[in-house]
Structure formats: C-alpha cells, structure tokens
C-alpha cells in the first residue's frame, strides 16, 4: 500500500491543521522540537517555516523516506514503538499528532517513559489521539474481515481519559490539561474510507501482503457503506483526547 500526499492534502488536510493547533499550546522555548509520528514531513515543513528546529521519528520506513524528500529542513529517524528514545534530555518540547493510539496497550508504559526521558526538564508535550469510541464501527468491521482471512486483529488502543491520565502520570509527566471531545471525521468521496484505511491503518496489516490488505479494505468499506456513507461523504464517529503534559 502506498501513501499519497496529494490525497492526504485533499481529504485529510485538517490533520495538519490539528498539528499546528497543538504546537500553539506549547510555551515557545529555544531548542529542538520532537515530532512523534512525522508521517511524510508535511507538518514538519510547516513547523520549520514557523522557526522551529524539528527532529521527527516515524515508525514506517517508507514514510521516513518520503519525509526526507518532503523537506531537507528537518531530521527524520526511523524508529519502533518500543524504542522511541533518541537522545536522553535532548528535546525542549514535543508533539504527537494522531499517533499515540497506534502504540499497543502493553507497550504504552515503556513508550511514554522513553518519551519522558527524551525531554529536558521542564519540557512540554502536546498530543491529539483517538479515545474510547473512536472508529468503533471500523474496528469491528476490520476484526470480522481479518477473521474471514484466518487472521487475528489486535485493534487500536483507544483509551478512556482517566486511564490515559494514569499512564502519563506513571511515566513521570505532570498533566497540565487533558480534554476529551467528539470530533467526527468527514471524508469526501466513495473511495474515502479505503484511502483512510490505506494510509492510517497501514501498520495493522501483515507486511508485504498488499493483496490481502486490499481484500480486507474492500470488505470493510462494503460492510460500512450503508451506515457511514451518505452518497457524498463518509462520517466516522471519533472521540479525541487532546492533552498537554510537562516533564
């Protein structure tokens, strides 16, 4: 499956705007900004234009390559969700835009601890992630389609606010704010859900099995078309956790 930046800008451009809103919550300080989940570098490039020195970490090597082509003004690293620590006490601030829910629940404590250790004392991190209830219909349809292919679907980690607050505090963070709000995702076009799954759920599919992924995506889109597509757009119920924490 391929990531398409043109489709991203057309159908999912609001995600970049959400990232800029996250950065607006940070107290401006000198030093490097850690972008967790840099995707193809579109947000990083906008942050560079605003004067930030950005280092991004991405968990998909194909996206790392695309990010490096998108902008040479930032540094991008390929990482794993269980090994996000780049340099201890190295970053003055951090953002995680639409990525923390992709870390499996069992890896969340170590992941957040590693992020904490990567930051300098007094550094702030802002984030926007899926919360309980997000993509519930999509998750159920994926589970069923995976089972039909003889596979197990582990699902995303969409936590309740209180549960995630505890994880953050256990990692050492002071929670400055943690808001939960409903923010449905609207995607134009009959192919909108397929594009969404191809780009934002690509990591849940077995690697190098694109044909299987296409079959699953087609099944999911077909099973949800009557309930989530109105003839012009898909509307996916989503609940977000938007927070700011301090080391």
Image: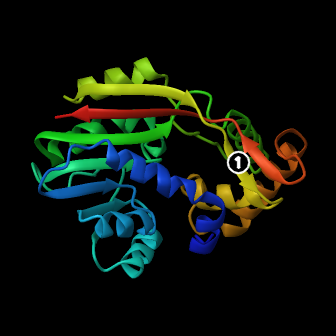
- Give coordinates of residue 180: x percent, y percent: 49, 26
Q: Residue furthest top?
A: 162
Q: Residues within 10 Å of mark 1 (few under 14, many from 20)?
A: some
Which image quadrant: the C terminus? top left
| Residue 206 quadrant | bottom right
Viewed as shown, does residue 114 lie left or right of 16? left
| Residue 115 quadrant | top left
The total of numbered circles placed on residues is: 1
Figure coloring: rainbow
Viewed as shown, does residue 4 lie left or right of 101? right
**Residue tagged 1:** 186
Helix, strand or loop status at disc 1 = strand
- Give coordinates of residue 12: x percent, y percent: 60, 58
- Please name whichever residue, 134 or 150, is drawn nearer the observer in this view of the structure: 134
- Can the viewer see residue 77? no
- Can the viewer see residue 188? yes
Residue 162's place in the image compared with 187, above or below, is: above
- Give coordinates of residue 242: x percent, y percent: 43, 34
Which image quadrant: the N terminus? bottom right
Tell me what residue is drawn at x 45 percent, y 76 percent.
66
- Give coordinates of residue 189: x percent, y percent: 80, 60
Residue 217's place in the image compared with 105, above or below, is: below
Viewed as shown, does residue 188 lie left or right of 222? left
Tell me what residue is drawn at x 9 percent, y 48 percent.
89
Residue 124's place in the image compared with 202, above or below, is: above
């Amino acid at each position: 499956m391929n990531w398409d930046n043109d489709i991203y800008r057309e159908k999912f451009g609001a995600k970049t705007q959400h990232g800029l809103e996250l950065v607006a919550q940070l107290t401006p300080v000198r030093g490097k900004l850690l972008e967790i989940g840099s995707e193809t570098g579109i947000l990083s490039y906008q942050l560079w234009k605003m004067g930030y020195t950005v280092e991004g970490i991405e968990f998909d090597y194909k996206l790392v390559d695309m990010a490096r082509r998108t902008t040479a003004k930032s540094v991008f690293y390929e990482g794993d969700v269980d090994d996000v620590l780049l340099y201890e006490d190295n970053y003055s601030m951090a953002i995680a835009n639409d990525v923390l829910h992709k870390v499996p629940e069992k890896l969340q404590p170590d992941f957040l601890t590693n992020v904490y250790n990567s930051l300098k004392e007094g550094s702030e991190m802002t984030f926007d992630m899926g919360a309980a209830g997000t993509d519930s219909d999509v998750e159920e349809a994926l589970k069923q389609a995976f089972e039909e292919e003889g596979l197990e679907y582990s699902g995303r980690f969409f936590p309740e606010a209180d549960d995630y607050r505890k994880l953050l505090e256990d990692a050492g963070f002071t929670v400055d704010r943690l808001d939960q709000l409903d923010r449905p995702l609207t995607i134009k076009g009959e192919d909108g859900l397929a594009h969404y799954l191809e780009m934002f759920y690509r990591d849940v599919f077995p690697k190098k099995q694109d044909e299987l992924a296409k079959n699953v995506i087609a099944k999911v889109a077909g099973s949800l078309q009557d309930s989530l597509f109105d003839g012009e757009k898909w509307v996916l119920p989503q609940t977000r956790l938007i927070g700011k924490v301090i080391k």
